Amino acid sequence: MTKENKTVWILGAGASMSNNFEFPNINQIFAKAKEYSIISLNVKTLKDDYKELSEFIVNCFNKSLLRTSDKIDVEKVMTFLQIEFEKKGSYSNLQLMDKVIFLIRHVLSECLVRGNSNEEYEHLVNNFLNRNTSIISFNWDIALDQLIKSNNIYENFLKQISSKFTEGFFNGYIPFPYKEFPTDTGIYLKMHGSVDWLYCPNQQCRVNNRLYVLEDSILESHYCSECHEECKILIIPPLLNKNYDKYPSIKKIWNRSFLELNNASEVIIWGYGVPPTDFYSNWLLTRSIPHETIIKIINPECLRISNHENELQEYSINKTFVNKFKEIFSRQKITFYYNYKDFKNNFDINQKYNVKV
Ligand SMILES: [Zn+2]
């Protein structure tokens, strides 16, 4: 079997944010929830539904859901709830966790409705997606999903990861184990789950490990047709990555992404900054990508821009950011691009901003 040249895109929150200015970063989820009146009735009053969560946040972090200046890290809240659940087994922690997940879904679907541009994702889909290109996304939102529903890489996700076809004739069997990973197809892999992914949480249920993708109404409750338990949404904050093993579909996605990266001739990382707490992704990027693979980073954080009095802007390298990638990809060739537009026009930061990486 000959190996085909394969490009793998890795997308982080920065990619969705540069497409649609409504999309929040991880620290803005609660502020957006307030702005969109999801958690509050007015500037001073929380909805009853969120009072318990508010108390938890005050107790743990001394921060208020109503104070916009308080930056509340939603991943940290979820991680604290999970740890307390593991220690105390308290059902109320689980309920609060569900509340946070519902809030994330609500905020992200609201952003999708209010935002109006998807220009760069559209360009990516129309110009850079070949048959065997894969996309690895660390995002929970579905801005890109909506654009690639008819694309082969989304169909491969449905066929190979979700349960869409497992009962049917089409993919009702699992092929014989392979000796060499086939590189001629691409796939869409969402590493931390998605606001439109459902699973049945009942461990005794025979469809417990299956993943279902909602086609519409992502805010409505759904119930398992097998055991009638209320389904849960599969999104996992990176800080909880020790739990990846608990969700076989997520585990499958991580295994598959290792293989995709291991067979990539080019890896393009857009808007993903490899958070220091996310040891798993750090490990994945460090260990899976061959030395000869070409690495391209699209991220405005690679530059520092200082404004002078005479309105001239001066550009310099953001060493902390750039060095993080140089450390992960110490043997590969890396090129940095300030934003998607520069990438599309093939202007790296050395050429366009006259800096030296
Ligand atoms: Zn069930």
Image: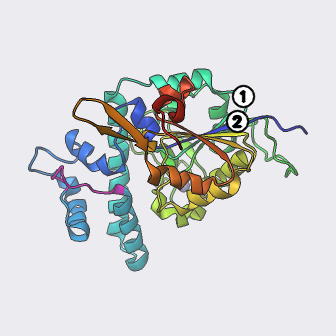
Left or right, 191 with respect to 310, comes to right
Q: Where is residue 44 shown, x and y percent of the image?
A: 8, 50
The one nearer the camera, 294 or 5, is: 294
Q: Amino acid at mark 2?
A: Gly
At mark 2, the secondary structure is: loop
Residue nearest the viewer, comparing 113 with 271: 271
Task: Answer above or below: position of 331 versus 304.
Answer: below
Question: What stretch of residues is rendered in magenta?
Answer: 65-74
Q: Quadrant of ligand 1?
A: bottom right
Residue 285, how many percent across, how many down? Answer: 62, 53
Marking on residue 204: none
Q: Is residue 303 visible?
A: yes
The residue type indicated by label 1 comes to Arg
| Quadrant of res 165 | top right
Mark 1 residue element:
loop
Q: Nearer the viewer, residue 236 or 309?
A: 309
Task: Verify whether residue 243 appears in magenta.
Answer: no
Figure colour scheme: rainbow
Give the residue displayed 50% in from the left and 35% down from the top: 349
Find out whether the residues at labels 1 and 2 contact each other: C-beta distance under 8 Å. Answer: yes
Mark 1 is surrounded, within 10 Å at the Cα level, by few (under 14), some (14 to 19) or many (20 or more) other residues, namely some
- Which residue is at 47% across, 35% downward? 338
- Report the side of 100 relative to 255 (left or right): left
Nearer the N terminus, badge 1 or badge 2?
1
Residue 294 point in image, percent of width and height: 68, 41
Extreme residue in the left direction: 44
Question: In the rendered image, which quarter contains the C terminus?
Answer: top right
Where does label 2 land, which residue? Answer: 186
Residue 208 visible? The answer is no
Q: Quadrant of the N terminus?
A: top right
In 3D space, how far apart are the residues under numbered discs 1 and 2 (Cα atoms)?
A: 6 Å
Q: Which mark is residue 131?
A: 1
